[in-house]
Image (tube, grey):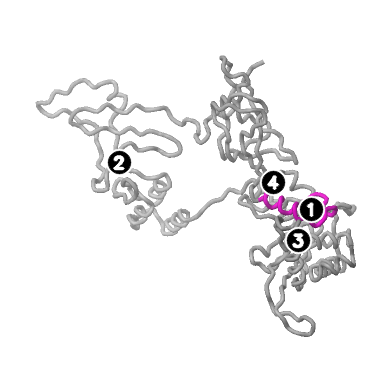
Amino acid sequence: MTRVKEFNLPDLGEGLTEGEILKWLVSVGDTVALNQPIVEVETAKAAVEIPAKWAGQVTAIFRSEGDIVEVGTPIIAIDTEPGGEAPPAEEPARTPVLVGYGPRTAAAKRRPRKTPGSPAAVAEVVLPPEPAIPQVASPAEPVSPVSPAGPASPGEVAGPASPDEVAEPARTLVALAKPPVRKLARDLGVELGSLTGTGPQGSITRDDVLAAQAPEPGVRAGTREAVRAGAREQRIPVKGVRKLTAENMVASAFSAPHVTEFLTIDMTRSMRALERLRALPGWRDVRVSPLLLVAKAAMVALRRHPMVNSTWAGDEIIVKDYVNLGIAAATERGLIVPNIKDAEQLSTRELADALNALVGTAKEGRTAPADMSGGTFTITNVGVFGVDTGTPILPPGEAAILAFGAIREQPWGHKGKVKLRQVTTLGLSFDHRIIDGELGSKFLRDVGAFLTDPEEALLAWG
């Protein structure tokens, strides 16, 4: 049995077939321990760290950061008995490369030999990700071509050419410019060699090219404007969490008939209840937000109206006797909806701890795929962005989603007088195949009643 073992991208569950290499946590030559995290991979649901399957020394890394890799494809090789002479790991179909570098794209070229009395010739060296230019003219010195030697002048004896000079003739000096600038110059018909660069080390910039352009045959105004627009645009690949979210939202929006209702309520008593809660000895180190009371209100209302916590299955409706409470969270990789399993069984303190853990894990990008599956009811807190409310789209497989808007101090009729009160607006979207207007209205009414006076609701409903 060989000591060098190839580690394949494992099956991360939930039907996922591929992942993107986000970051390698080890390098070739590193010694790794069993179960030590070696790579961070983003799937369509979350970013996860994958541990080493064996202890040993890393001998090869087959995939670069940013690569999309199918499950079962080799990504790294580990020598499980380092120190002795071990057979090399078999290479996968793609050429293995070091992290951050691509496969070699051209053979190396030797720099031409310098000859007395003549300028040094410059060889073009190809290095990823863009050609490196060994010699650059200063801004004060225009670039001039270096021509190959012509016939010998009278009285001058031409000696035999060396092998190097025959194999590698002198080249023209190359203007220093990045690949996008070179492409722009080609599109506009601008000769880079005729420009004086204003960038670092005399490099030619995009502005230099645009300033030098002039109307010429073959370059239409529309083409020029398109090039300019392209230079000011950013292209973001749709992949990972964002891609899955888009697919799910489109599927949900065009499969479930959505209805949205709104309710504006006075949350002044809820805000006072939160202040009293924060002052309790056992709650002083707990982060408490209005979202906690909204989640508690949803649990009470779902117990009173269980049909809201259900799924449309074509020829039947599946009513869940458990609540996996989803909380929509905005992350750097896109919107995710992790959920708290069996949230209806949690006390208020346990629910607060679960919400804080869920949000913290989501912000760190460490939410596991299993934590984002099986949701039954979702809350999206758009109020944190200063938004009053919205018409949210149902997560796939759920019958309702509650939007919680910003809490603002507004004039409100209270006990026969107009006073400034803490007011918010709730928005409930639901699947009209399951929830009719009456049921949706009663559910939203009960959530609002709880938030208007949480103490009375708990006493009356339990």
State the SS at label 3.
Answer: loop
Q: Contact (CB < 8 A) between labels 3 and 2?
A: no
Report the magenta residues as a range. Answer: 340-362
Judged by its main secondary structure, the magenta piece is helix
Q: Distance between the residues labelled 1 and 2?
A: 66 Å
Q: Earlier in the sequence, mark 3 or mark 2?
A: 2
Nearer mark to the viewer, of 2 and 4: 4
Q: Distance between the residues labelled 4 and 3?
A: 31 Å
Q: Earlier in the sequence, mark 1 or mark 4?
A: 1
Q: How far apart are marks 2 and 4 (CA)?
A: 49 Å
Nearer mark to the viewer, of 3 and 1: 3
Query: Residue 350 bears which disc, if any?
Result: 1
Image location of residue 252, percent across then percent down:
75, 55
Q: Quadrant of the C terminus?
A: bottom right
Instruction: Give the mark count.
Output: 4
Label 4 sits on residue: 367
Label 3 sits on residue: 280
Tell me the amino acid under the disc marked 4: Thr
Label 2 sits on residue: 136
Tell me the amino acid under the disc marked 3: Leu
Tell me the amino acid under the disc marked 1: Glu
State the SS at label 1.
Answer: helix
